[in-house]
Image (cartoon, rainbow, N blue to C red):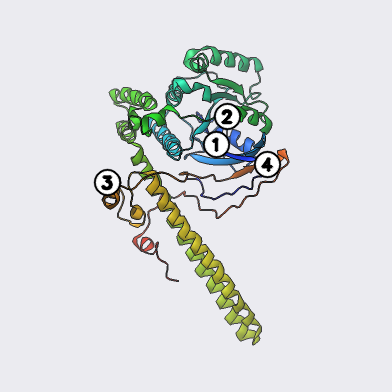
Amino acid sequence: MPRQGAHTMRVPPGFKKRTLYILVMGLIGAGKSTFISVITGNENIPIGVAEDLDGVTEEVQDYILLHQHDNTLYEIHFIDSPGFDDGTLVDTEVLSRVATYVNTTYKLKKRLAGVLYLHDITKAKVGGVGQRNLRMLEKLIGREEYSNCTLVTTKWGCNTNSQDEENRETTLRAEKKFFGGMLDNAQHASMERFHPRTKSRALEIITPYLKNSFTPQISQQMVDPRGPKLPLGETEAGKVIADNLEKLAQTNLELDKVKYAQEILSQKYDESLFAEFKQKRKVLRRKIRMQRSGRWIMRTTIIGGAITASVLLAGPGLSAFVLVPVFETAVSGQKKKDRKEKEDLKAQFVKASQYTDPDWLWDKSVQELQDVKLYSLKNETAETYLTKVVQRGEFVGIDASEGFEAGLDAAGSAMSENSESSDSDAELSEFDHENE
């Protein structure tokens, strides 16, 4: 999960402000995180190496760039998706996570500006996995929306034979089973090289999308009020994976994984959203508990040090007691912020789903979506609109090359969640009310 953060921008006089979202997709090792790192200037984004078979991005991440262009200050969200691989489970989960993010953005009344699909030009072949994921990309976007996608080739110059790279690009462009199907269409996609690998070149690639917005086909099919509201596996994109699962099931290979993947595909939007908020609840709980522990350690240090010094030095140590009210004032501010984060999380859930009572977030017995329905009965008729993005940017890139200063307030950095350990009963019982 990305860290939660609130960011404010000071818009220069005479400038407009616009927020947009660009989805970055591709196979493992295609260079998605590298592209985002270059364009945002953020060197802390985890990037894999060529020898790794596993991707380094396991969750959908949201990285922000502030960019000035034509008297407009853009807050550009780059949605870094996990890479697709040849594992059945991986592909299913990746599509589920991407769909949840994109659909939530849609329900926020925000629209994608564009989709970048990155491809490693050093790869000699586009195998069955790559072709299947290209078909999934086509179905996720929709034929009528191909013009909102750019097919980006990466890692130019990494091959000792430059002619091989040129030949591969020609093949990708011409063959319908590769990029040709999206390029040779009335609403055709575009194709670009990420070369040289510079920020200016990356900005050139995304500039056509600065004033753009569209609704991908998967959102039309899953969450559009006028649409069929299909489960993931019945969407056109989901069918690509579902068909492959059926083939694997017939061969009796990895049936447990196939069954689990089919369960994911059967989920509708609310089910995947519940899983997302359950994880966010876990992260927030852990953060607040660790902050509370840190405060008690600090209190012990301040008061204990003051008492020791005053005994040994007969007086000077008393000045350390002055730190106590200062510290408690800071603690009060932190608690207020914690309460706001909890209220914000509750508001996000209420407005993101059909269930209108968020109290389940503080009830440790709620572990399944069915449990949430018990809380929703008393508020069935409440309106449900989203107000916040499910995942905010972990890092912010500021485009300083344009010669302006955009003020940023990075309000509180939340802990990233790396452990799957469960919360104990004692820890949960103290979550909502602190006795300090």
Which comes sooner in the sequence, label 1 or label 4? 4
Residue identified by numbered label 2? 209
Image x and y of residue 328, in percent: 54, 71
Tell me the crowding category of disc 1: few under 14, some 14 to 19, or many 20 or more residues within 10 angstroms, Cα based.
many
Residue 248 picture quarter:
top left
Q: Residue furthest front?
A: 14
Tell me the crowding category of disc 2: few under 14, some 14 to 19, or many 20 or more residues within 10 angstroms, Cα based.
some
- Quarter placement of the C terminus: bottom left
Give the residue type at disc 4.
Answer: Gly
Image x and y of residue 11, in percent: 64, 45
Image x and y of residue 322, in percent: 61, 77
In the rendered view, tell whether residue 78 sits above or below residue 435: above
Give the residue type at disc 3.
Answer: Gln
Which comes sooner in the sequence, label 1 or label 3? 1
Tell me the crowding category of disc 4: few under 14, some 14 to 19, or many 20 or more residues within 10 angstroms, Cα based.
few
Nearer the camera: disc 1 or disc 3: 1
Q: Residue furthest bottom?
A: 314
Distance CA(mark 2)–CA(mark 3): 40 Å
Residue identified by numbered label 4? 14
Q: Does residue 326 appear left or right of residue 221 in this picture?
A: right
Dot label at residue 370? 3
**Residue 181 seen:** yes
Image x and y of residue 162, in percent: 66, 17
Distance CA(mark 3)–CA(mark 4): 51 Å
Distance CA(mark 1)–CA(mark 4): 20 Å
Residue 268 picture quarter:
top left
Give the residue type at disc 2.
Answer: Tyr
- Element on which disc 4 rests: loop
Dot label at residue 20? 1
